[in-house]
């Protein structure tokens, strides 16, 4: 009943496409069966309330809102922070822009001013220069959006000193900060700090339960109580209100109480792969990009061809550029599967 094994046809695959592919474990299934339930839209699901209180406390915010996905959490945040026509400042390859299907323009109605970065870390003085005051001609900047860890940066971490600098800039200009912290616990584990050392620099944070923390569904949007009240309305407006959501929230509680520290294993295995394959023929890995659970592999030939050949050897991954693969380590990848991934790259390198 509690098996999380793959179907027989893909049971032996090493799935490095994303940490979203993780399956619930036995402890989560047992928690789902035992969870007291209510109707979360009516505000009386005790398991959801417990999860929201836990999440808010862990990131040092007053309140939290359980939402179906990180994308919804981010878009609710923008809509709750901003008025239509406001401007936001955001890194040029941020998930909010790159992977959320035009949500900022369609839902919040904001103008997105993009900022270049080095693997997600924007230059604070340049960021400050881009802040605009509203006038007859110009939309005013109302929000700075950060992403930590940074997806397209290969799981890169924003240093604490940069987070502090962004906070000082925002305070000087009366601008709020929202953190897309889908993998913020990876950032905290990677830095060796409590997650509050990151989230104290932002007004609101959205983080995912369904990535490295291995819940099947769900994210938490956290911030001031008054902000979360507005966000709850936006969740309902977008169709994100769920009824007996405690079944899912029960998994989230396990994620936050049992699965944070083990993220270090994913980071260790990512570094192991990077060290083993970085100098193989036909590919390269920049060690500086391996800060958490992702490995960006540069390929001399087509990344799509490498993807196909790796798939034939039982290793799944995604190209993120014409000559770059992304490998993502997670709870369903053990030491033997890590070794099999390394062996697949070695086999292809020897054959090339």
Image (cartoon, rainbow, N blue to C red):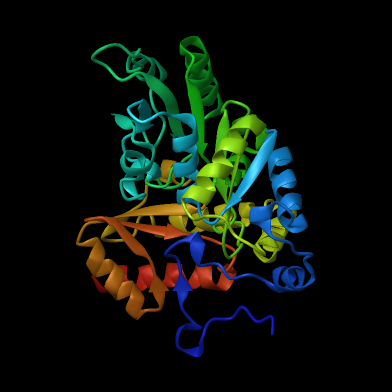
Q: Is residue 3 above or below residue 216?
A: below
Image quadrant of residue 115? top left
Q: Does residue 291 appear anywhere in the picture?
A: no
Q: Residue at x 42, y 53 (%)?
A: 295
The percent position of residue 325, horizontal first and vertical second, equals 33, 58
Of residues 161 and 170, the one nearer the viewer is: 170
Q: Residue at x 50, y 67 (%)?
A: 21
Q: Does residue 133 appear anywhere in the picture?
A: yes
Of residues 44 and 292, the one nearer the viewer is: 44
Q: What is the tally of numbered marks visible in this picture?
A: 0
The residue positioned farthest toward the bottom in the image shown: 8
The percent position of residue 123, horizontal first and vertical second, equals 38, 22
Of residues 341 and 72, the one nearer the viewer is: 72
The percent position of residue 143, horizontal first and vertical second, equals 44, 26
The percent position of residue 99, horizontal first and vertical second, equals 35, 50
Q: Is residue 315 above or below residue 287?
A: below
On screen, residue 308 versus residue 214, left or right, reads: left
Image quadrant of residue 213? bottom right
On screen, residue 330 versus residue 142, left or right, reads: right
Q: Considering the image in quadrants, where does the N terminus appear?
A: bottom right
Q: Residue at x 65, y 82 (%)?
A: 3
Q: Considering the image in quadrants, where does the C terminus appear?
A: bottom left
Image quadrant of residue 224? top right
The residue positioned farthest toward the front in the image shown: 42
């Amino acid at each position: 009943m509690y098996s999380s094994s793959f179907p027989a046809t893909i049971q032996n695959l090493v799935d490095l496409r994303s940490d979203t592919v993780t399956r619930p474990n036995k402890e989560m299934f047992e928690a789902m069966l035992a969870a007291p339930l209510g109707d979360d839209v009516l505000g009386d699901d005790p398991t959801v309330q417990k999860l929201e209180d836990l999440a808010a406390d862990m990131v040092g915010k007053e309140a939290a809102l359980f939402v179906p996905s990180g994308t919804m959490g981010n878009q609710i945040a923008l809509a709750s922070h901003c008025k239509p026509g406001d401007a936001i400042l955001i890194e040029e390859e941020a998930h909010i822009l790159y992977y959320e299907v035009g949500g900022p323009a369609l839902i919040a109605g904001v103008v997105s001013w993009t900022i270049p970065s080095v693997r997600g870390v924007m230059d604070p003085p340049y960021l400050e220069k881009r802040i605009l005051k509203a006038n007859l001609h110009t939309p005013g900047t109302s929000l700075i959006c950060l992403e930590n860890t940074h997806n397209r940066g290969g799981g890169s971490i924003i240093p604490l000193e940069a987070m502090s600098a962004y906070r000082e800039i925002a305070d000087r200009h009366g601008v709020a900060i929202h953190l897309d912290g889908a993998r913020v616990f990876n950032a905290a584990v990677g830095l060796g700090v409590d997650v509050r050392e990151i989230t104290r620099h932002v007004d609101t944070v959205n983080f995912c339960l369904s990535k490295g923390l291995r819940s099947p569904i769900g994210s938490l949007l956290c911030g001031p109580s008054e902000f979360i009240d507005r966000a709850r309305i936006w969740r309902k407006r977008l169709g994100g209100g769920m009824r007996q959501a405690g079944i899912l929230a029960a998994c989230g509680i396990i994620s936050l109480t049992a699965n944070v520290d083990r993220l270090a294993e994913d980071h260790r295995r990512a570094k192991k792969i990077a060290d083993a394959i970085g100098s193989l023929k036909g590919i390269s890995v920049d060690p500086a990009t391996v800060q958490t659970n992702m490995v960006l592999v540069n390929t001399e030939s087509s990344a799509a061809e490498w993807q196909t050949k790796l798939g034939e050897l039982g290793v799944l991954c995604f190209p993120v550029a014409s000559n770059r693969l992304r490998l993502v380590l997670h709870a369903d990848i053990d030491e033997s599967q890590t070794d099999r991934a390394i062996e697949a790259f070695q086999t292809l390198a020897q054959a090339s």
